Image: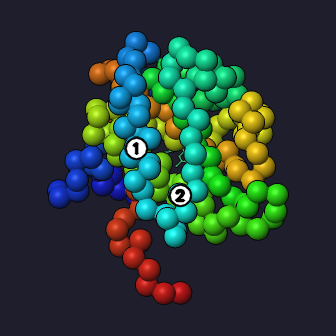
């Protein structure tokens, strides 16, 4: 493992990205910027341009945000509610009323769309933390998500206070990522 985040030449939007668990609870994201996050996801590539994603977005203080917060696990409840925006990330898994896959790449494509959102967030001076620590089934029921869609993850977006802990990020070395065969 090594802290690669300062590698020369790595784009600053990628090098500076990290996933906070401390957000500024006084910072409100305006509507135009919240919509830009969705716009970034919209322009992500997907298999056959299937765009197998949808998002439930709540801004702190609104009704959707309150309904999302209700289903956080104890661990994420400690930090996620103070983010400016919470988003539930939904994958289009099946064709309605069947067990046929809508796209075998639905999760892959959703992940890529969320990655686009995180980079757009970074460009807006925001940070994001994706997370699994919430009740997926309860959240699906809360928002009437049908069974051919899957509530997959959530993302929290917001500003980070200057005092936030930016401890070193660890990664496997590049040499380990390049497949050399079995
Ligand atoms: C699919 C996914 C699920 C995650 N689930 C959680 C989670 O439940 N709780 C949490 O605190 N962080 C969660 N994370 C954040 C990761 O722990 C974090 O991205 C990782 O440690 C790398 O740190 P970095 O993003 O700061 O580089 C999740 C990230 C992803 C992509």
Q: Position of residue 35 (x, y in %)?
A: 41, 34
Query: Considering the numbered disc 2 on the image, is that residue within a helix, a strand or a loop?
Result: loop
Q: Position of residue 108 (x, y in %)?
A: 55, 62
Q: Is residue 112 above or below residue 178?
A: above
The CA distance from mark 1 to mark 2 is 13 Å
- Examine the rendering and report whether any part of residue 7 can be seen: no
Name the mark on residue 51.
2
Rendered residue at 58%/22% (across/down) = 65
Question: How many other residues sit within 10 Å of disc 1, few (<14), some (14-19) or many (≥20)?
Answer: some
Q: Which residue was labeled with disc 1?
A: 39
Query: Considering the numbered disc 1 on the image, is that residue within a helix, a strand or a loop?
Result: helix
Q: Quadrant of residue 87?
A: top right
Rendered residue at 32%/39% (across/down) = 122
- Examine the rendering and report whether any part of residue 68 can be seen: yes
Q: Position of residue 32 (x, y in %)?
A: 35, 29
Rendered residue at 54%/54% (across/down) = 110
Comes first in the chain, label 1 or label 2: 1
| Residue found at the very far left of the displayed protein | 8
| Horizontal relation, residue 161 to residue 90: left or right | left
**Which quarter of the image is occupied by the N terminus?**
bottom left
Rendered residue at 52%/68% (across/down) = 47
């Amino acid at each position: 493992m090594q802290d690669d985040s300062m590698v020369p030449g790595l784009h600053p939007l990628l090098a500076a990205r990290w996933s906070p668990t401390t957000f500024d609870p006084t910072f409100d994201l305006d509507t135009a910027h919240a919509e830009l996050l969705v716009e970034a996801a919209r322009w992500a590539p997907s298999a056959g341009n299937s765009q197998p994603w949808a998002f439930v977005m709540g801004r702190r203080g609104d009704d959707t945000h309150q309904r999302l917060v209700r289903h956080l696990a104890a661990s994420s409840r400690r930090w996620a509610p103070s983010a400016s925006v919470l988003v539930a990330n939904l994958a289009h898994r099946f064709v309605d009323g069947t067990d046929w896959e809508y796209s075998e790449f639905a999760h892959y494509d959703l992940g890529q769309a969320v990655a686009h959102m995180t980079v757009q967030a970074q460009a807006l001076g925001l940070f994001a933390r994706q997370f699994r620590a919430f009740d997926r089934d309860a959240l699906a029921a809360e928002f009437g998500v049908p069974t051919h869609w899957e509530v997959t993850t959530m993302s929290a977006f917001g500003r980070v206070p200057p005092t936030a802990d930016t401890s070193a990020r660890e990664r496997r070395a590049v040499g380990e990522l390049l497949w050399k065969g079995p």
